[in-house]
Each structure stands twice: as C-alpha cells, then as structure tokens.
Amino acid sequence: MVLKGKVHKFNIDDLNTDYIISGRYKFKTIDMKELSQHLMEDLDESFYQKIKPGDFIVAGKNFGCGSSREQAPLVIKFAGISAVLAKSFARIFFRNAINTGLPVIECDTDQIENGDEIEVNLEEGQVKNITKNLILSIKPLPQMMIKILNDGGLVEHFKKYKGFKID
C-alpha cells in the first residue's frame, strides 16, 4: 500500500476527537460525508476547503485522545484523507481507525512540515518526504492490519472472507 499526497500539519499534542469532529455535529446526523465537511473546524475553519483526496493529516503525540466513537476516524476517511501520521495515537482511536479502514502511522513527525509532499509505503515501512528529499522510517503495521486496511476496514474484511481471515 503506497499513499501519496500533501501534508496538513497540526503542531500540537493531544489532538482530541472533539477537535477532529466537534460534538455539536456528532449527534445531528449519521451522514459521514456531511460530517466530514466539519473536519478540524475548531482548529481551522477552512480546513475542509484546503484538503484534496489523498492528503495527509500530521500531528504530534497522542492523536485522537478523548471519545471512543468511530466518527472521528470515519470523518477523516470520508473527507478523503489517505492517512494520519503522528508520534503516537490514543489506543482506542488507533484501533477504530484500522477497523474503519483509515491508515494510521506512528513516526517522528518533526521533519514533516505543512505543505510538504510525502509518499508513505506501509509495506516497506517508510515515509518519503519528497519536498525535503528525506526518507523516514515508520513503525511498521502488522501484516494483518495492512490486510484489513487493504480490504477497506474490518467490516469489509469480514464480508470478503465471511469471517476473520488471519493468513
């Protein structure tokens, strides 16, 4: 799985799920495409207008802390973001992201800046910062998680294999 796009960086740690999708929207609709238009709105009112399909969100430590609802990774995915890169993730957000088919990559994000063009290769375990001509190692995902991501998430994986297929 190789992903390529532009970086949208938030230079903060503990970016919580209420910043990803504000609570004022979470209970008004279950339409993820509609909700995704409010992605990161409390941090940047025009964020949704800035992103293009395939772009990346990059942040610091403990990305996705807070609520355990799946809306946070789902709105990121439905907005067209190809992956989130952060120094670390809240564990429940990490699992929800994989389950919904959103790649999440743990790496040192200090050498990635807003506007950089990057390419992520999950199987080789690296991020190429095309803008800065750098290669960064990433914490590799287990093959099973890559398989789930390639299938579009856990539900799609179950549909495809009529259950959970390990090998």
Image (cartoon, rainbow, N blue to C red):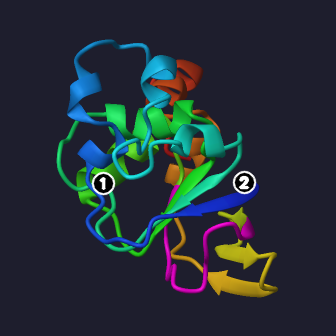
Q: Which residues are magenta?
A: 104-118
Q: Is residue 68 left or right of residue 95?
A: left
Q: Residue 102's spot in the image, x, y percent?
A: 51, 44
Q: Quadrant of residue 160?
A: top right
Q: Is residue 63 above or below residue 159?
A: below
Q: Is residue 88 left or right of residue 108?
A: left
User: Which-is-in-front pick, marks 1 and 2?
Assistant: 1
Tell me the kind of residue under disc 1. Gly
Look at the image and tell me whether residue 9 can be seen: yes
Mark 1 sits on what residue? 64
Q: Quadrant of residue 127?
A: bottom right
Q: Nearer the viewer, residue 50 or 131?
A: 50
Main SS of residues in magenta: loop
Residue found at x 71% / y 40%: 53
Residue found at x 67% / y 51%: 55
Look at the image and tell me whether residue 143 can be seen: no
Q: How far is mark 1 from mark 2, CA to CA?
A: 23 Å
Is 87 a magenta residue? no
Earlier in the chain: of badge 1 and badge 2, it is 2
Q: Residue furthest front?
A: 45
Q: Nearer the viewer, residue 104 or 158?
A: 104
Tell me the kind of residue under disc 2. Met
Mark 2 sits on what residue? 1
Q: Residues within 10 Å of mark 2 (few under 14, many from 20)?
A: few
Q: Is residue 16 above or below residue 140?
A: above
Residue found at x 64% / y 73%: 125
Q: Residue 119's spot in the image, x, y percent?
A: 75, 65
For the residue labelled by badge 1, is the local secondary structure a helix, a strand or a loop? loop
Is 107 a magenta residue? yes
Q: Is residue 64 left or right of residue 44?
A: left
Does the residue at mark 1 contact the one at mark 2 (Cβ under 8 Å)? Answer: no
